[in-house]
Image (cartoon, rainbow, N blue to C red):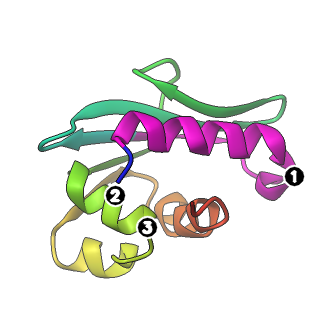
Amino acid sequence: MPTTKEIFEQIDQALKADPSRVDGFDCVYQFNLSGDDPGTYQVILKPGQVGAVEGEQEPAQCTIEMDSADYKEMIAGNLNGTQAFMSGKLRVNGDIGLAMRLESVLSAYNG
């Protein structure tokens, strides 16, 4: 299984290869991941600036907090984001509507 950093690098490459998939988005998602493979990453979806970066570069409208192992399961399609939220594995700060749209963005780049 890829590392958290490798997953965000893949998301970055996929977003830059086909930014049209996120047309209409103008936001920054931040991921605060804990556990065995922790890190802070942002997915930036702004006109003319699309990609994934390590660290905090922009003010985030939606922050997702979860264990890195659960995040990897969610990216792999083995953990539903809504179920993760309902069971307390995924916490959202900020715009919950953006969090609900995130799953469709990430599923487009499922490895």
Q: Residues within 10 Å of mark 3 (few under 14, many from 20)?
A: some
> Which part of the image, by quadrant, shows the C terminus?
bottom right
Residue 43 locus on image (x, y percent): 55, 39
Count of numbered circles on the image: 3
Q: Is residue 63 left or right of residue 17?
A: left
Residue 76 is labelled as: 3
Residue 91 vs 32, above or below: the answer is below
In this view, the residue farthest toward the left is 35
Residue 92 vs 62, above or below: the answer is below
Q: Are marks 3 and 2 in contact (CB under 8 Å)?
A: yes
Query: Is residue 61 among the parts visible in the rendering?
Result: no
Residue 88 vs 36, above or below: the answer is below
Work out whether residue 83 or residue 17 is closer to the camera in this orientation and state it: 17
Q: Secondary structure at mark 2?
A: helix
Question: What amino acid is found at the position of numbered circle 2 in the picture?
Answer: Lys
Is 5 magenta? The answer is yes
Residue 72 is labelled as: 2
Q: CA distance from mark 3 to mark 2?
A: 6 Å
Residue in the image at 87% along x and 52% along y:
20
Q: Which residues are magenta?
A: 3-30
Q: CA distance from mark 1 to mark 3?
A: 22 Å
Circle 1 residue: 20
Residue 73 locus on image (x, y percent): 32, 66
Which label's residue is closer to the chain start, 1 or 3?
A: 1
Question: What amino acid is found at the position of numbered circle 3 in the picture?
Answer: Ala
